[in-house]
Image: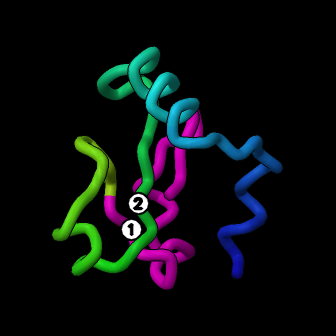
Amino acid sequence: MKWMQFFTPAKSLDYDEAESYIAQHPGDQITILDVRQPSEYRQSHIPGATLIPLPTLDERLSELDPEKPTLVY
């Protein structure tokens, strides 16, 4: 996939680490990217998360701010 070229290797976070990171970077300081399907997103998602299903990510990269850290789940 073309989108992989835009991501650098990143550390994985467990639930507690991610929750702490989000709490320390509120609002629009970070992008929380949900790459699941719309039906999964409707069932439950992190508040403020942006939904871009993984199969469409390469077509929608322009929607992400490259200057912000991005948490992907």
User: Which residue is found at the position 76% from the left and 45% from the top?
Assistant: 10
Residue position for label 1: 52
**Residue farthest along the top direction in this orientation:** 24
Question: Residue 19, how many percent across, how many down?
Answer: 45, 31
Q: Is residue 65 above or below residue 30?
A: below
- Where on the picture, by quarter, is residue 69? top right
Q: Is residue 70 left or right of residue 8?
A: left
Any mark on residue 15, and which? none
Q: Are marks 1 and 2 in contact (CB under 8 Å)?
A: yes
Question: Residue 58, how many percent across, how many down?
Answer: 56, 75
- In primary-sequence order, the first of circles 1 and 2 is 2
Range of the magenta residues? 51-73
Q: Is residue 14 above or below residue 37?
A: above
Quick one: 2 or 33, which is closer to the camera? 33
**Residue farthest along the left direction in this orientation:** 42
| Callout 2 secondary element | strand
